[in-house]
Image (cartoon, helix red, strand yellow):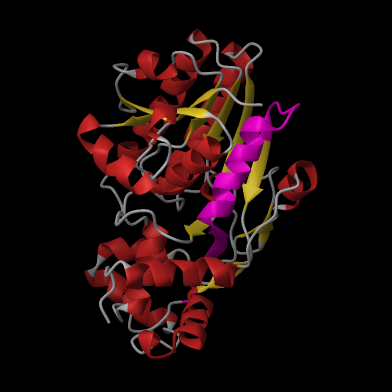
């Protein structure tokens, strides 16, 4: 099966690999960027058949451009969503564009006759606000928004996915819907734009992190995230599905250990000691952006990906491969100077 698919947020990390996989498998791809000034740049690092890829200017918070981007598409992968490096002053700075962007894409998709819509959600919509009594989460779980300690990013992803599912149930008609919920995404880079998870490896390699606080995340390779999106877009019989997309949960000290064990003298600045909890709490007094890390101390948020593996035949690379691919890309591109 092939056709025309819209991938939103075409300049993003996951979207780039998904666009490549779709075109390699015969699909024509429409993609959105906030400004067409980026088209030539993005085409350059995607390196795909240019005749198979069209760009459209569209923004999560405005209607302009969405009808044109959707025209002729049978499938949509809504990957675009705000993901800042720091903590916004108000949660609505993330919640509003995430929720309204998803609903806007759904409305225009229905108007265009789109048959299947895949939403990029996150483990952040699954595994937060539950306290420290659990360490493994599945598709049945939702982040607990009644917990005031849930930070703006997981709150935005939860609100956006719930709103999308509610809209599909009420307004979607025959449209098939699924979400993919990745953990922290690592892997090779297509461009010099760095996601938050890639920034972490950069800081470890540069010695910007003197010690490793007791925090962690599920690890998943961007190529496997794209592949799960592809399978969710193309597999028959999918409706109202949800897919956890997470490999093993590793602490930051484990990530640092993988780097030092495999990179030799290129990892001499990588920290090898754990940071005492009290020290991170002390830093957070003078650097408020660290408060979100304090809230994560000691938490384990593993994801059970067996549903996607069992029903879609999806597989994952080992976390070491994803982490080292990130490190090699950062070094080879000169983003990290050793």
How far from the left and from the top, in percent, is residue 215? 49, 71
Q: Is residue 226 magenta?
A: yes
Whether residue 92 is visible here, answered yes or no, is: yes
Give me the residue at 56% from left, 69% from top: 321
In this view, which residue lies farthest toward the left?
37
Which of 24/94 is in front?
A: 24
Does 197 sit left or right of 139 as displayed?
Answer: left
User: For residue 332: magenta?
Assistant: no
| Residue 191 image-quadrant placement | bottom left
Count of numbered labels shown in the rendering: 0
Vertical arrangement, residue 76 with respect to residue 93, above or below: above
Image: 113 above or below 269: above
Position of residue 10 relative to residue 319, above or below, is above
Q: Which residues are magenta?
A: 214-241
Position of the N terminus, as image quadrant, is top right
Q: Where is residue 44 shown, x and y percent of the image? A: 31, 45
Left or right side of 175 for 43: left
Q: Position of residue 179 (x, y in %)?
A: 60, 36
Q: Is residue 66 above or below residue 283?
A: above
Residue 182 in view (yes/no): no
Give the quarter of the image for residue 234: top right
Q: Nearer the viewer, residue 191 or 93?
A: 191
Residue 274 spot, x, y in % from top left: 45, 85
Quarter of the image with the C terminus is bottom left
Q: Residue at x 30, y 70 (%)?
A: 284
């Amino acid at each position: 099966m092939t056709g025309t698919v819209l991938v939103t947020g075409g300049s993003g990390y996951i979207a780039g690999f998904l666009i490549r996989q779709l075109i390699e498998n015969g699909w024509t791809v429409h993609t959105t960027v906030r400004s067409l000034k980026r088209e030539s740049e993005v085409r350059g690092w995607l390196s795909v058949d240019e005749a198979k890829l069209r760009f459209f200017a569209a923004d999560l918070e405005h209607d302009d451009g969405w009808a044109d981007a959707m025209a002729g598409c049978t499938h949509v992968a809504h990957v675009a969503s705000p993901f800042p490096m720091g903590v916004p002053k108000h949660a609505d700075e993330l919640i509003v564009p995430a929720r309204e962007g998803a609903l806007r894409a759904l409305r225009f998709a229905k108007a265009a006759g789109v048959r299947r819509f895949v939403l990029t959600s996150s483990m952040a919509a699954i595994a937060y606000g539950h306290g420290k009594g659990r360490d493994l989460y599945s598709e049945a779980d939702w982040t607990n928004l009644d917990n005031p300690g849930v930070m703006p990013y997981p709150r935005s992803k939860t609100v956006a996915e719930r709103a999308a599912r509610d809209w599909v149930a009420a307004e979607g008609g025959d449209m098939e819907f699924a979400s993919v919920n990745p953990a922290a995404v690592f892997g090779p880079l297509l461009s010099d734009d760095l996601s938050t998870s890639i920034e972490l490896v950069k800081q470890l390699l540069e010695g910007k992190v003197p010690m490793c606080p007791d925090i962690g995340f599920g690890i998943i390779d961007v190529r496997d995230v794209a592949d799960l999106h592809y399978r969710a877009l193309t597999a028959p019989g999918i409706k109202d599905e949800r897919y956890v997309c997470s490999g093993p949960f590793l602490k930051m000290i484990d990530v640092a250990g993988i780097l030092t064990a495999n990179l030799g003298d290129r990892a001499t600045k990588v920290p090898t000691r754990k940071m005492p909890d009290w020290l991170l709490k002390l830093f957070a007094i003078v650097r408020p952006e660290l408060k979100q890390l304090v809230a994560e101390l000691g938490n384990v948020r593993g994801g059970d990906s067996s549903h996607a593996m069992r029903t879609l035949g999806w597989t994952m690379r080992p976390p070491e491969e994803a982490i080292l691919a990130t490190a090699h890309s950062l070094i080879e591109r000169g983003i990290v100077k050793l």
